[in-house]
Amino acid sequence: MFNASARPLTDRLAIISTRAPGPLASRLQWITPSHFSGVNGDASLNLNGFDVRTIPGSDTLQILLVNHRPSLGPNVNSANSTIELFETQLGSSTMRHVRTFADEAIHAPNRVAWVAQDAFVFTNDRSPQGTFGRKLDLVLGGGSVGYCHSTGCHLIQPSGFRYPNGLVRGHDGLIYVPDSMTGKIHVFVLTRDKIFEEVDTIQLPYGIDNLSVDEDGDIFAATFPVSWKFLQSLKDPYGINPPMTIFRVRKREGGYEVEKVLEDDGSVLPAATTAVHDVKGEMMWMGGSFAPYVSVCQMH
């Protein structure tokens, strides 16, 4: 059970120019929501994962945000999370709210990924709140993958995971779903009938948080070699920096190539739950849900 009154009210989204000159602070554009009421009219967001797509032939960005709203009904331990759709223009400081996706299938959302002009997939990283299975997730596994279209949402892969986390859609059209508990990446094809079919798995040595895809189609995975220390850092993010490792996954003929590209023992970099590779700028941008700052490393 969480104390809704203690939740942060300052969550917000920013866009940064990674290649413009000058200090990072001068390249940061905070985005203010418009036409969005939030909870009880406070316009607040409680953010987790997100994804962005550009409408072809325009400078319009469509942004999907996972929003963990507090429960307002008599059952304060029930789920009330949503996925919010916003639109903005490149260079704008505001984003206009378009739609709220609220459904029983969206019970513990973690990350979203566009799969079409009006459709996306998302992970539920745990079993539904209030169920007996949720208490055993760490032992037996839990979580699911859902699909939303303009007409509604449903689960397309209801089981078979152990804390599914930051999924992505690859340049090959396949959906890559990482397991935080097992270090496995499940590879799915989304059929025309909107059915998930698992076509491959990729095993990494450590538990995985989020995946990202760079301009070349390579997939980058943020992982934690020492899971118990990462869990400790959640309570003291400024005092404890757990080790972290970034892997690159490349699709080759006949399989996948996994390569370690960056690692830190916790003495320099804070815990990174996401790593994004800028191919042209030859830089790795790393941030985390509990990291006190964003890290940037040159990659040569």
Image (cartoon, helix red, strand yellow):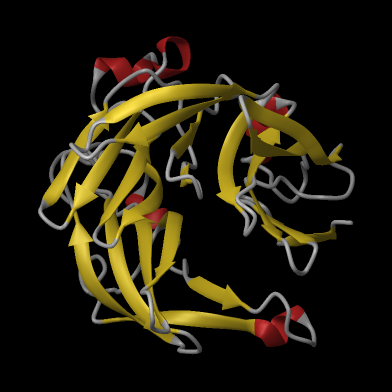
Please state the total of marks drawn on the protein image. Answer: 0
Q: Is residue 38 or residue 22 the one in the foreground? A: 22
Percent across and percent down for residue 272 are 69, 47
Q: Is residue 243 something that shows in the picture? A: no
Residue depicted at x 13% and y 50%: 152
Residue 84 is drawn in which quadrant? Answer: bottom left
Of the 4 image quadrants, the one containing the N terminus is: top left
Residue depicted at x 41% and y 16%: 141
Residue 192 is drawn in which quadrant? Answer: top left
Percent across and percent down for residue 239 are 77, 46
Residue 299 is drawn in which quadrant? Answer: bottom right
Of the 4 image quadrants, the one containing the C terminus is: bottom right
In-image side of 184 versus 142 (left or right): right
> Among all residues in the image, which is located at the extreme front?
253
Percent across and percent down for residue 210 are 56, 43
Percent across and percent down for residue 278 are 70, 63
Q: Is residue 117 or residue 90 the one in the foreground? A: 117
Above or below residue 297? Residue 32 is below
> Among all residues in the image, which is located at the extreme left?
151
In-image side of 120 versus 187 (left or right): left
Above or below residue 206? Residue 266 is below
In-image side of 212 versus 168 (left or right): right
Q: Is residue 102 something that shows in the picture? A: yes
Q: Is residue 200 or residue 182 the one in the foreground? A: 200
